[in-house]
Structure formats: C-alpha cells, structure tokens
C-alpha cells in the first residue's frame, strides 16, 4: 500500500483524513482521496455506457441468492456510507509498480491465504503472513537486486468460487460453502444460508487487518534493520531457519558497510515498506457498495475501494458477463486468471475490454495451467498478446493447476509439481522473449503442512495432513516458502555461504527477463554450486589482510590455485572488506569448470605511480573454462592518472581493471567498476560470455576509459548495465561476432561503437551484432561505426540497432569511415572496411547537433544495404530556446551510402 500515508481505520471506522476540508466530518464518503491532489489528467476515460449498475444487465455468476432481499439492501447501504478501505493514490502507485514489472524492471510477489477466515482472524496470524511476505521479499530483493512488489491476498480475500452451487453429503443437499463473507463451512442448513450480516463482518475484519498492516509497514516492524527478527518461531531451529539467518547476517553486514561508508540507513526507504492488498472480485454487490468516485482526477474515475488490486477468475471472466462489465469501469489494477482453456483470441478481446487504452500496469495476466500444459498453451497466449501490441504483466500461479487429493481425502499439492510449473512458466518466457513479471502463491505463516515435498520427510507430511482434516484449502507453508526463496537466490548469487540448498545451473544465454525464474520453488534439477558440495576458499584463510594497504595478491593467487586444481565445484570468497591487490593474473586451464569468484567487498588497485609503467592489466583471467564473477567493487584508483593525462604530462597508458582473455563459459554479474586507469572490462579471444548487471563509473574527462571492450569474441551478451565513463560505453573490436547488447544505459561517454576498425590490412570482420533497448544521455555519440581511412580487408555485416532513446546526444547515428580523433598524420586514403546490412529501427530522442544522422562512408567501399526505419530525432537548441528564437530542424548527411528508408523517419532520410 502506499501504507505510509494512509489513514488508520479503527472501529467505528471514522472518516479518513482528507486534503479537502469540506469533506471532513461528513457521514458519507463520496470521493476517495490520495495524499496529494494529482495534477495529471484522467488517464482512462470511462465509456459513456458504463455505470455502477450496468453489470446488473449482464449474466452474473457466483453471486449468492439471499432470502431476505431487504436485509441485503440495508447492509449494502451501510457499506456505502463506510469509509474506503484503500485509496485511489495507492492504487495508482501500484499500477506504476506493475508497469515496471511488465518490462522486467520489478517483480510481483503476490501471496496469502486461499481464503481468509473469521475464525482464524487475529493479530498474530496477520503478522505472520505479513512476515512471510517480508522474508520472501528480502530474499528476492537481495538475490535479484531488483524491486519486489509485495501484494497480499488479504484484507478482503473471503469469497470462494465454486464449480457447483450445491454440495451433497449423505443424501443431504445444501448450498456450497462460498467463503466466510457469505456463509459458514459447517454442514447444516442455517450455516449454509447466505447471511448479509457477514458482509459487515468482512468489512470490519478487512479494516482491522489493514489497520495492522499499515502499522507494521510504517511503524518500524518492516525496517530492513530488523531482517534478523522476521524468522518464525517454528522455523527458527530448522535448516531453513538457519539458512535465513545466514542471509539476514549478510544483509546486516551490508548495512554495516553502508553505515561505515557514511550512507545513512535511517531513510524511510530503509525503515518502511510498500504493501498492497488484493482479492478476487466475486461478490459484485459488495464491490459496488465500496466503489467511490475519485475527485482528485478530472473526468470521474471510479475505484473499487475494497482492495488495491482485483482479479477476475476463470469462472467469471466471460466477455459478456457481469464481472467483466463491472471491472472494465473501475480504475484499479486488474488481474485475469487464465487456465489452459483460454483461447488466445478471447484473451486479446478480454484485455482490450478491460484496458482499452493499453495503459501499462493496468492488467496482470495470472497463468495457472500445470507444467505440461503450460509449455504447450502459454506460448500461443504470449504471442497473441504481443502481436496485438498489448502491455500486460505476466504472472505465474503454480498452485491451482496442481491440486491433488491426499489418501485421507484432503486437497493438497506436490511441491515438485509447483516447481515444475514455475520452471515451465519461465522457460516459455525465455523462449518467447517476454518478461516473467511475478508469482501468485497461496501461503501462510502458520505451522501447517498442506503442500507435500520440499524439505520435509514424506511420511511426516502424510501424518501432518491426516492431523489437519479441518484445513481443506492448501497453501505454501513457511518451510516450503523458505525452500522456494532459497532455491532462487542460489542461482542468482551462486553463493553457498548465504543459505542455498539447491540450484539450477546458470546458462550463459539467460538475460534479465529471467532474473527471477529460479528464486521461487524452482526445480533443483541440475546441480551447480551448492552448500553441500562446494569447496569454499576464503581469501582471508590464505593470509589476505583487509586493511586496504597490504598487497593481498599472493593470498588471492593461493586461493585461486586451490580452486583451480580441485576437481569439485569451488568458490573463491572475498569478504565484505577492502583488499589491496597488485597486478594479478589468474591463469588456467583448471581441472574445475565450475568456479565462482564471489566478491562481497572491494578490491583496490595501487596508485599508478606504484605500478610498473608497462603494466597493461590489473586483474586478468586467462585460459579459464567455466567461471562466474559475482558482485563486489573494483576500484581502479585512476583519478591521479586522469589528472596527469589532462595536464599532458609524461604518463603511462594505464592498466585495464578486468581482463578476460582466451576463456569461455564466463559470467560476470552485478560487478561495479570504479575509476579504471584504462579500460574497465575487456573480453578478448573468448566465447560464451555474459555480462549482466555491470555498473561502471568514471568521470567524463577520464581519457581512454572504455566501459566494456569486446574483441575477437563470439556469443557475448551484455545485459542490464549502466555505464558512465570518459570514452566508449561499449566498444566492439575486430573479430567479434554474435554479440547482443540489451537494456543498457550509457552516459556520459562516447556511446556504443563498432571500431575503430581498419588498423591493419589483414583484419577480421565484425558480424551479427544486435544493440537494442538502450538509452544514451549526454553522450558524444549514440550508435556509431568508425574506421580509419586506410586499406583493410575487414568488414562489418549484419548489425541491428533498434529501440533506442537519445537524450541530448551530439551525434545520435553515425557511420564514420574517415575516423581520426584529433591527431596529426591522419590517413587520407579510402577505408577498405566494407559495411553492409546495417539496420537502424525505432530510434527516438534529441540531438545536440543539427546533423542527427551521419553516414560518411568509403568512396572505394560504399556502405551497402543500410536500412533506416521509424526514426524521430529532434535537434535540441538550448541557446535558441533561451533566446526565444525559432528552432532549426534536424538534418541528415549521406556520402557513398546505399540503402532503403521505411516508415516515418525524421530528420528526412538521405539513404
């Protein structure tokens, strides 16, 4: 919720505080108010043929028949007078968060009871369920280093859809139990009769639950400093409890490191949490009674104030049904439960009805199919939605498609089946190039056994089930939840020190759209580095001193020798401290093809004056097969060398911070490189390399500090990285092929460049390069190909630049075959580099110079098959803006170029 700002609700439910005094103290609430009055216009104009009552003209399923209609009307009128349970601003904020999840920038964790109960209502149960979500959230956040959106199935999740409106036992036929807000589960006529008064009880319990959740979220209970306090008592002394303690300790150490570095941990972002509520929209009269018009937005948006998010289920999602009619008119974020029965065309129509303006974050598709059907059915749904151009958040519900009956007759689920379905969900999205945006789980903080499998003995599980015959609805219990999160983070961090008991081998071809897919309940099918079989080599055990002054490289080399000579999976572990190491080469080949170099602390390079002037590399890995470098900081300490170069003194060239040479099957994840003396990261002569989540920082005046340089390498992937430096953010040298660069933010810097090429006559070509979903801010160039004007047998072929944003870039699109960066004696021949099959597509933004597209190709080897499509680049003239003078249009420049232009292109193409 935006719980930090919501008013507390206590009996007898006083009117919440509003920013508008005229509504204070009025008995009836006509509008919902967020904390701040919105200045934005209505983002979703409602259809003129929708009203609060229009659903009543449609066929309504799953709504109980009440004997006393007048009593029902009286109850609904009371509910209309009650304050809203949630507020419009909170729902809008959740929509923003879900919009991030739709594009892989966040992940939804939605969970709670199958159905809330009046009998089990209590502060402890609310606290424990909240605590479960906090635990899962911190594990996911720590493992993925991405925002986790926490949404509870609580404070309103009472009603239960039924396949049959009646239930028969021993020849007696009675209405089915439909949830505590409608009737009781006791099997007698009075208990099963729908009772309107239960709606008031449901409201009161929801209000009290929200009251407590708000207090937990902002009152200090959710402070990250309390991470060690969130373990549940009955898990405390278990294997899972121990694993969680280890993670909590790691988080504590990180907080201590932040505090030591002068970063405050008392900011509200560290002491509070956002927590939202959700439930299935079933009882439409109740939902209508709690729907209010939002007066803070122009145009009259209606919000269902019973929850932040509502979903429509499998049994009520008919295109012409009452539930779809009601939900299309409320502005809350909505979910659609989808099974293997869903037709792709029907899903597209349903999305268009519920989200006609294709608003990001509005729709979440919650898929429940079972693993086998998931692999067959889901791809068709994903393709249909994508082809229709619809923006949705895809979420997996692995619970409801895997229900089985235990021998005692109780409903349960196999933990393995749940993991299998989740694996299938993420595999499909990997295959289709879409984003898995979240998981939807039934879970509880109570000590129950309702899913079999996981970490517990099967015989004891069977006994637990037989002891719980009053618990017919299954959830993921806390120990199983611990298994779930643990399995995922193992894959992310490859670190047995935290608490991970199993993992799936990480392949080099996965990118951020898979960032979450092994954290929750994922199958331990392929062993990678686990707590039980890994050999851990802590550099401190080999004599490394963490004082930042003593050269620790001998200790690091000893740890490497131990890991490299071992035939078992091994980890070199660098604790959360500072270590000075001089120029060091970690040399292979090794007996072990499963080495993790885990850096929790910071590695510091010597000042350049204390290194040999001939030193070209600081940290080098050479001839290594099968290694992951995870986390940590590399501080190249290049500041003094930058000053030397800027003063044009006699300075050494400097050393590259991280060099990976002649190696394959390498992954570098969540590494942060600061102030490299020369290049930050070099990949040379390698194949099958992934750079994921790499962050690079150096001042824009730092010379020759390329962020990532790739040369003579194949099948390299660069994902989800942010690069700010004084030279090329990413440079691509001769001999590179099959390269993908995706979701990278560049700037300041010189952009992403192929080249410079043409250094020599016998030079390898560059081919099959894709650069997409990138943002350039204040860079010298955007997407550039550059070669010297001299003979060469090299080439550039099969390059795609697409889906890019340019923010005030000097030269957004450039081919320069007369490259000579301000030096004397430039070659004045024709470039022999043949450039062909290059596509520029969907590139938008602003150019800081008038020539936004420049194609300056070789006279002897003209550029061929250059494709330009869907370009919109505007010349931004700040001095003209300041002086109030008319803006000049952007232009393009062409010389010796042949190709085609498609779609809308501005500036007008000269190709």
Image (spheres, helix red, strand yellow):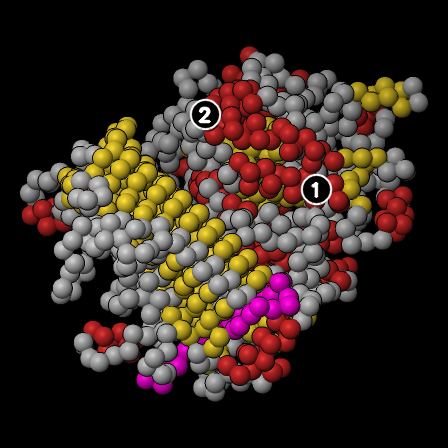
Q: How far from the left and from the top, in percent, is residue 616?
A: 37, 74
Q: Nearer the viewer, residue 496 or 317?
A: 496
Q: Quadrant of residue 76?
A: top right
Residue at position x 58%, y 52% from top? 507
Q: What's the mark number on residue 837?
A: none
- Residue drawn at (88%, 51%) of the image: 460
Few, some or many residues within 10 Å of mark 1 (<14, 14–19, 20+): many
Q: Which residues are magenta?
A: 586-610
- Ranked by sequence position, the earlier of labels 2 and 1 is 2
Give the vertical position of 21 relative to 316 (above or below).
below
Whole-percent x, y for residue 558 in the image:
59, 80
- The C terminus, quarter of image: top left
Which element is circle 1 on? helix
Q: Which residue is mark 1?
A: 420
**Does residue 679 appear left or right of residue 404 in this picture?**
left
Q: Is residue 385 visible?
A: yes
Q: Position of residue 601 (x, y in %)?
A: 51, 73
Residue picked out by circle 2 = 388
Label 2 element class: loop
Image-based side of 238 in relation to 574, left or right? right
**Residue closest to the eye, 508 or 439:** 508
Magenta-span inclusion, residue 437: no
The answer, for residue 197, to whether it is visible in the render is no
- Disc 2/disc 1 C-alpha distance (Å): 29 Å
Q: Are marks 2 and 1 in contact (CB under 8 Å)?
A: no
């Amino acid at each position: 919720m935006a719980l930090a700002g919501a008013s507390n609700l206590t009996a007898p439910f006083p009117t919440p505080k509003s920013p508008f005094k005229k509504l204070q103290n009025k008995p009836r609430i006509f509008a919902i108010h967020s904390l701040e009055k919105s200045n934005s216009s209505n983002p979703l104009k409602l259809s003129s043929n929708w009203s609060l009552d229009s659903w009543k003209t449609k066929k309504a399923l799953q709504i109980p028949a009440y004997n006393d209609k007048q009593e029902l009307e009286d109850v609904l009128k009371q509910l209309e007078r009650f304050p809203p349970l949630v507020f419009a601003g909170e729902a809008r904020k959740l929509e923003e968060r879900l919009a991030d999840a739709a594009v892989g920038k966040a992940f939804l964790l939605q969970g709670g009871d199958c159905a809330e109960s009046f009998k089990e209502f209590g502060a402890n149960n609310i606290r424990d369920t909240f605590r479960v979500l906090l635990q899962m959230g911190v594990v996911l956040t720590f493992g993925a280093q991405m925002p986790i959106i926490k949404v509870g199935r609580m404070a309103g999740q009472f009603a239960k859809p039924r396949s049959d409106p009646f239930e028969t036992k021993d020849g007696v036929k009675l209405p089915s139990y439909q949830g505590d807000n409608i009737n009781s589960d006791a099997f007698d006529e009075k208990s099963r009769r729908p009772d309107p008064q239960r709606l008031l009880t449901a409201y009161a319990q929801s209000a009290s639950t929200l009251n407590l959740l708000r207090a937990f979220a902002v009152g200090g209970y959710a402070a990250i400093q309390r991470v060690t306090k969130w373990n549940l008592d009955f898990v405390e002394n278990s294997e899972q409890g121990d694993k969680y303690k280890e993670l909590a300790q790691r988080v504590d150490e990180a907080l201590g490191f932040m505090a030591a570095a002068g970063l405050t941990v008392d900011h509200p972002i560290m002491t509070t949490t956002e927590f939202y509520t959700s439930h299935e929209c079933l009882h439409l009269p109740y939902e209508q009674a709690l729907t209010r018009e939002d007066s803070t937005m122009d145009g009259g948006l209606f919000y269902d104030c019973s929850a932040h998010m509502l979903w429509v289920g499998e049994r009520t999602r008919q295109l012409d049904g009452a539930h779809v009619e009601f939900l299309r008119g409320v502005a809350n974020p909505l979910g659609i439960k989808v099974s293997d029965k869903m037709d792709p065309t029907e899903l597209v129509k349903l999305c268009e009805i519920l989200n006609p303006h294709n608003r990001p974050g509005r729709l979440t598709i919650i898929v429940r199919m079972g693993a086998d059907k998931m692999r067959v059915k889901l791809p068709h749904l994903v393709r249909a939605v994508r082809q229709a151009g619809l923006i949705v958040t895809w979420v997996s519900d692995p619970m409801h498609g895997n229900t089985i009956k235990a021998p005692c007759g109780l409903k349960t689920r196999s933990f393995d089946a749940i993991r299998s379905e989740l694996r299938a969900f993420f595999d499909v999205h990997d295959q289709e190039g879409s984003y898995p945006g979240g998981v939807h789980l039934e879970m509880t903080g109570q000590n129950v056994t309702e899913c079999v499998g996981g970490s517990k003995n099967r015989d004891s599980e069977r006994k637990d089930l037989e002891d719980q015959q009053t618990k017919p609805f299954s959830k993921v219990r806390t120990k199983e939840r611990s298994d779930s999160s643990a399995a995922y983070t193992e894959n992310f961090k490859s670190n047995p020190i935290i608490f991970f008991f199993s993992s799936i081998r990480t392949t080099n071809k996965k990118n951020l759209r898979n960032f979450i897919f092994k954290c929750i309940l994922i199958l331990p099918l392929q062993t990678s580095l686990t707590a039980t079989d890994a050999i851990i080599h802590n550099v401190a055990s080999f004599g490394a001193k963490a004082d930042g002054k003593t050269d620790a490289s001998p200790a690091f080399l000893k740890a490497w020798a131990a890991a490299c000579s071992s035939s078992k999976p091994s980890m070199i572990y660098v604790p959360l401290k500072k270590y000075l190491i001089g120029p060091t080469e970690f040399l292979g080949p090794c007996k072990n093809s499963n080495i993790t170099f885990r850096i929790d602390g910071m590695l510091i390079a010597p000042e350049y004056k204390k290194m040999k002037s001939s030193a070209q590399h600081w940290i080098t890995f050479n001839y290594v097969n099968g290694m992951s470098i995870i986390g940590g900081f590399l501080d190249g300490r290049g500041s003094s060398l930058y000053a030397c170069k800027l003063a044009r003194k006699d300075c050494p060239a400097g050393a590259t911070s991280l060099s990976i040479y002649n190696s394959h099957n390498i992954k570098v994840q969540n590494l942060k490189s600061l102030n490299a003396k020369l290049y930050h990261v070099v990949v040379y002569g390698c194949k099958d390399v992934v750079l994921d989540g790499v962050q690079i920082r150096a001042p824009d005046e730092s010379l020759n500090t390329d962020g990532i340089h790739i040369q003579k390498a194949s099948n390299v992937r660069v994902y989800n990285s942010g690069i700010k430096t004084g030279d090329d953010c990413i440079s691509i040298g001769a001999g590179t092929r099959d390269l993908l660069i995706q979701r990278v933010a560049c700037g300041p810097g010189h952009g992403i460049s192929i080249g410079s090429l043409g250094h020599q006559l016998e030079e390898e070509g560059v081919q099959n390069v894709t650069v997409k979903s990138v943002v350039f801010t204040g860079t010298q160039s955007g997407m550039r190909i550059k070669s010297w004007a001299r003979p060469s047998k090299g080439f550039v072929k099969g390059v795609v630049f697409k889906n890019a944003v340019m923010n005030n870039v000097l030269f957004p699109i450039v081919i320069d075959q007369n490259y000579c960066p301000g030096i004397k004696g430039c070659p004045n021949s024709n470039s022999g580099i043949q450039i062909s099959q290059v596509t520029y597509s969907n590139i938008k933004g602003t150019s800081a110079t008038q020539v936004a597209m420049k194609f300056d190709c070789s006279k002897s080897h003209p550029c061929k098959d250059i494709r330009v499509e869907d370009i919109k680049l505007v010349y931004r003239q700040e001095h003209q803006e300041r002086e109030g003078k008319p803006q000049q249009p952007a232009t393009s420049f062409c010389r010796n170029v042949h190709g085609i232009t498609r779609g809308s292109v501005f500036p007008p193409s000269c190709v």
